[in-house]
Amino acid sequence: MNFHTMKRILSLAAAILFGMSAYAQVPQLRSEVFDLIDLERPGMEQVKALHAAGNDIEAAKSLLDYYKNRKGVATPDIKDPAKVTISEEHQKWADDGLKHTFFVHKGYQPSYNYGEDIDWRFWPVKDNELRWQLHRHKWFTPMGKAYRISGDEKYAVEWTKQYIDWIRKNPYITDKGKVFTDGPGEGEVKADVDPDVENMRFAWRPLEVSNRLQDQTLQFQLFIVSPAFTAEFLTEFLFNYHRHAEHIMANYSDSGNHLLFEAQRMIYAGTFFPEFKNAETWRKSGVEILNREIGVQIYDDGGQYELCPHYHLASIEIFIKALDMADLNGFRNAFPQSYIDTIEKMIMFYANICFPDFSNPCFSDAKLIKGKQMKTNFKKWSRLFPENQAIKYWATDGKKGALPEHLSIGYPTSGFFVFRNGWGKDALQMTVKAGPPAFWHNQPDNGTFEIWYNGRPLFQDSGSYVYAGEGEVMEWRRWFRRTASHNTLTLNHENIETTDSKTLLWQPEGDVQVFVTENQSYSNLKHRRSIFFVDGKYFVIVDEAIGDAKGVVNLHYQMPRGKSTNSRETMHFNTEADNGCNMKLQCFGPEGMTMKKEEGWQSPDYMKKNKRINASFNVKKTDNTPVRYITVIVPKEEAGDNPSITAKFLDKGYNANGVKIQVKVGKDKKKTLSYTL
Ligand code: MG
């Protein structure tokens, strides 16, 4: 009988004897823990003595008693473990988790089953997120809550089993180089790589490790009262936890939101387990990084440098979470006033670029966050910034506080510009994105915009749909990310090569407000976009493609879903929605301009997409004569309303110093719109 057969028979016997499923493995005493913990700390006297006497199992039991009775460490997420509540959704994650049906990702529902003998490498769809996020163990904390609420030991027994099973099957490999990269790398499993090494890339990616560091502080509080949380288990837990924190110390991400998440969670680790000799180092590293990165990642106007509303909001939450942890455990002075002021600026930035119901533009990799969630945020933020009248106003539905005094506002460093005629849901608003080069979650979409009119979005950004993986996953990623899926200009439908917009003019006041931005989109083609917000009623967009590039210039607009009429003769679209949010768009271009309708999509959430029309107005460019368009967008309530629109250039041709055009909309008088730089 060889070793493997023997092992199989033994484990089967164990399963029969103890009624355990085949995957379960018993926690072992990890004596190394006594070297990791500072045994000189008050309260550790008995642990120290037992360990010194060579009685590590009794020392571990004493350590467990210490933790069961420990006071004075708090986490913001759970105030009192005995009084937790659970949502219906989380109860389901907990119950499904018992059967190894693991909630991994909202975009992949119903959840997959990972087998009785859990296969932590199961990867049913080659989307990196699906494999990475399995290792966040999102069902563990719900299991802990379900345990506390029901008192049913099955949750605790199963959690300890899964916890140990995960450790055994996701070995930590230190001697084979760094394979747990953080970047967007496509999820191909390389045949010539040791599968354990390959697995490190997923199970031990720093972002996932940090996620576990944070959530395990909660699981620890919820499960420690269970008989299944044995002294042996405690040593496995602490040893594993320590390895997690040390892993982050050595492998912090280089930049971006991942680094922020990791730092904030190291603050959790160092604060929650002060018994570790290295705890203070962990906590300090987290504090130091957040204090540094809030200056690096947040521009002077309050925008986060990934230029993605979703990660902007996530960054606000990260900075506040660290502050909450500091408040609860008495080290708020680790964060200077400038840190707190920056968070406030970030909140005001976000509130301004969002629409009147606080839904967000879906720029870059942003999902659509609805206003309801924001209400909770504003309430929390108002407690942190009680003097801020606008936050108070939004937190109280206008019962207290006051709206900002401004309407339109620009954030020139981040390149977000907002035109608005009011703050109410019936307002007309446009948020334009035209910023500097940015980090991974940013999309090559310079000059794009979203409009809000009468309670709904128009020209909603396509969104992101998926992040990264293999095959079809990447094809979809590329579609949503590409320049041509935005409301901006391309050459031959290709992605722009540079995303570095320069603001030439921002005039946010008066009857005619103006924004002029320029991006060297391709080495031989510059895109200048001038937007006029006229009488708070409609928008006129002048697009100029300048340079000696030859090919076809395409001006893209992502049309709203639902019925619309359009005409290739007059180059217009007229929507026919019955919800009070309509618009007429008409494009005026050079002789020979054609209109093309393609399949378009809008993704409000991961792996969710709705069909619509991606329209483009196309002009052949055969020499270095600039191609110039005027687009007029008139929002209107009634579907049947068909205002006549005319527009023409008054200047002879492209003029680097300005633009002069004439526009007439419906019964309004002819208007001359112009600016001089
Ligand atoms: Mg986009």
Image (tube, rainbow, N blue to C red):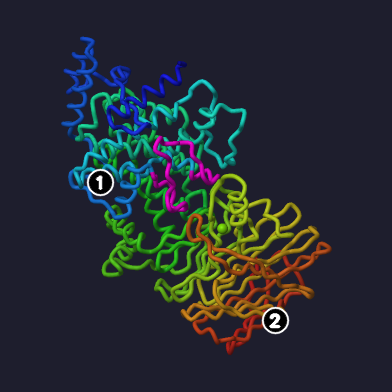
Instruction: Say whether residue 124 is magenta.
Output: yes
> Disc 1 vs disc 2: which is toward the camera?
1
Q: Is residue 497 shown above or below 57?
A: below
Image location of residue 108, percent across then percent down: 47, 51
The residue to which callout 2 is attached is: 570
Q: Is residue 373 shown above or below 192?
A: below
Q: Is residue 167 shown above or below 527?
A: above
Element marked by disc 1: helix
Give residue 339's quadrant in the image: top left
Q: In front: 619, or 323?
A: 619
Give residue 277's quadrant in the image: top left
Q: Residue furthest top?
A: 53
Quadrant where the N terminus is found in the figure? top left
Left or right side of 63 for 22? right
- The range drawn in magenta is 101-130
Q: Residue at x 60, y 80 (%)?
A: 574
**Disc 1 to disc 2, how far (Cα)?**
62 Å
Nearer the N terminus, badge 1 or badge 2?
1
Image location of residue 482, percent across then percent down: 63, 56
Residue type for callout 2 = Thr
Element marked by disc 2: loop
Q: Quadrant of ligand 1?
A: bottom right
Q: Residue furthest right?
A: 623
Residue type for callout 1 = Ala
Left or right side of 299 for 265? left
Image location of residue 362, percent across then percent down: 50, 60
Dominant secondary-structure state across the stretch colored magenta: loop
Q: In front: 279, or 531?
A: 279
Instruction: Say whether residue 457 is magenta.
Output: no
Question: How many neighbours does mark 1 have within 10 angstroms: few (below 14), some (14-19), or many (20 or more)?
Answer: many
Q: Is residue 41 shown above or below 224?
A: above
The residue to which callout 1 is attached is: 146
